Amino acid sequence: MKIAISTDGDNVSAHFGRCPEFTILDISENKLIKKEVVPNPGHQPGAIPQFLHEKGVNVIIAGGMGMRATQFFEELNIKAIVGISGKIDEVLKKILKGTLEGGESLCKPGAGKGYGIEKSECDHPNEKDCDD
């Protein structure tokens, strides 16, 4: 199974489409086989789901994601898990233990800026990509 995590530094990014990169984990029999970090190809409707699909990703993990992005992933048979925050390594531990639980999206649709289409407001003022 391949899992992509929206990544900002060592943390899960709250803004799925505007994260600087994705951490792609290749997991087999509850063991990490390979960990790869790839740059975000750009935030345009359907581009990231297609990009991750071409990389063989089965699951996307993010802090937040809009309904349109979720639908793009569903069309490509990629499961979206949102409401995740914290360090990538801690998320990986939970994945391997089978204890990772998603929740409500951490950002509102259309919020955030950087790494793609610029927005005027951000719901996460503590994130570095949200500073004006």
Image (cartoon, grey):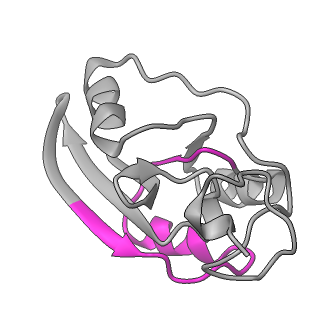
Task: Relative to 4, say whether 27 is above or below.
Answer: above
Residue name at image x 31 percent, y 32 percent: 90
Q: Count the labels in the image.
A: 0
Q: Which residues are magenta?
A: 36-64
Q: Residue 18 location in percent, x, y?
A: 62, 69
**In-image side of 25 versus 57 (left or right):** left
Residue 120, quarter of picture = bottom right
Q: Does 30 appear above or below 16? A: above
Asked if residue 11 lies left or right of residue 131, the reply is left
In which quadrant of the rendered image does the N terminus lie? top left
Q: Pick whichever, 32 or 108, lies toward us.
A: 108
> 47 above or below 91?
below
Could you say which is closer to the camera, residue 37 or residue 119?
119
Residue 14 point in image, percent of width and height? 61, 50
Q: Residue at x 68, y 69 (%)?
A: 131
State which quadrant residue 24 falls in.
Answer: bottom left
The answer to which image quadrant residue 114 occupies is bottom right
Quadrant where the image shows the C terminus: bottom right
- Which residue appears at 34% of the width and 53% of the height? 10
> Residue 58's x, y, as percent?
44, 49
- Is 26 or 112 nearer to us in this picture? 112
Please tell me whether residue 132 is drawn above or below residue 103 in the rendered image: below
Asked if the stretch drawn in magenta spans residue 39, the answer is: yes
Q: Is 37 in front, or is 52?
A: 37
Q: Please give the name of the residue rendered at 34% of the width and 19% of the height, measured from the top-left corner.
A: 98
Is 18 colored magenta in this rendering? Answer: no
